[in-house]
Amino acid sequence: MAPREPAFTVGIEEEYLLVDRKTRDLCAEPPPAMMAECEKRLTDQVSPEFLRAQIEVGTRVCRSISEARADLSRLRATVADVAALHGLAPIAAATHPFADWHDQKHTDKERYNMLARDLQALARRLVICGLHVHLGIEDEDLRIDLMGQARYFMPHLLALSTSSPFWGGLETGLMSYRLSVFDGLPRTGIPDLFESYGEYQRLVGQMVSAGLIEDASKLWWDVRPSARFPTLEMRICDVCTRLDDAITIAAIYVCLIRMLYRLRQGNQRWRIYPRTLIDENRWLAQRHGPGGELVDFGKGEPVPYPDLLEEIVEIVREDAEALGCVDEVEHARDIVARGTSAQRQLAIYRSALEAGADAAEALRAVVDWLIEETVAGVGG
């Protein structure tokens, strides 16, 4: 019997860095009262992250992209309001422009203590923030099938999200340096291809039995079946500095999955390509963001990212109309025209240098911009 149509409910998780408004550096030890107040106002929708200088929020289960936008807007606004009471500000950037990872301290919780023990210096470097989008797909085999096809589009989503061009005060030459840091961990990247949920479960079972992982939550793939919810979780993206950009990426992800489901209903499917090829596009997206090219493997040649984006907008138009998020999907064109956060951070940095600022001043100017942009278009 064919699985019934998925709910396509949406949940969005974002991680932010907390900066000192005076120094613009990371706040290695935010006051406990700040998290307590956030938890009072947002209950279980906010939590500490691995590092004390981080904070994570998550929307409720939302029935539409507009509902997700309203909830995420409220979460961003509340964290910013509470942080301001303590002389701090959240920045939605996947790396801090100049903070030193050696200075950071991890949160004293058992699971974080275990992570620090297991991963050692790799864990201490995790001064990075991502955007995760959960999509409700109740049928387990359908979830696995759609994950295998969706792998192709992960680099396209990454390029649009890039917000980490700096690391330790240096221009990295990458639009998403966060991914290089995260890829130092085991069990990351594009997932394997599975024929069924049972095959996926057997892999998890083998790893648990061998003592390699406690459960499936330790598989940190770019897209994965959630270990906690009946969702397909997209994890490849940098956190987006602007709220509108985060919502656009969520909308495109939802529409792509619905498009793949729609093809399946017509006995069609997206062609499966080797992970090695997808990894090449992943690298190109990480290196150049939307300012470069990705390979169209159907054509067998590189294509400018804006052209690929136009194709995506068109192939998901029917789905965007059905889900009521055409405007959000089409906002992707504005991101490319204006530049992602990474591209804009670099422009601000270089402009400040040209105006006579030294490197430290120019980096602080980038942080000032991030503080403002994180709450741009955000309401209470």
Image (tube, rainbow, N blue to C red):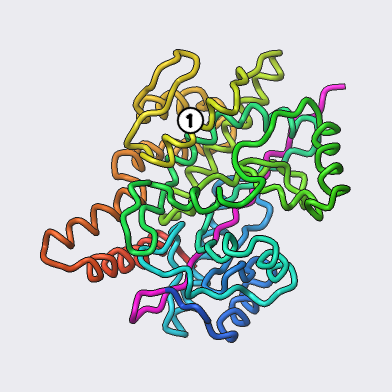
Q: Residue at x 62, y 64 (%)?
A: 120
Magenta segment, which residues?
1-25
Going by the numbered disc 1, the residue's amino acid type is Glu
Residue 379, image x, y percentages:
46, 64
Q: Was residue 336 drawn as part of the magenta stretch in this picture?
A: no
Q: Residue at x 34, y 79 (%)?
A: 23
Res 111 quadrant in image: bottom right
Residue 361, image x, y percentages:
23, 70
Q: Is residue 228 left or right of residue 83?
A: right
In the image shown, does 88 or 301 lie closer to the viewer?
A: 301
Q: Is residue 211 left or right of residue 58?
A: right
Q: Residue at x 41, y 26 (%)?
A: 308
In the image shown, does 247 or 23 lie closer to the viewer?
A: 23
Residue 104, image x, y percentages:
51, 74
In the displayed structure, 261 sits above or below 298; it is: below
Secondary structure under the numbered disc 1 in the rendered image? helix
Q: Is residue 30 left or right of residue 98?
A: right
In the image shown, does 370 or 186 lie closer to the viewer?
A: 186
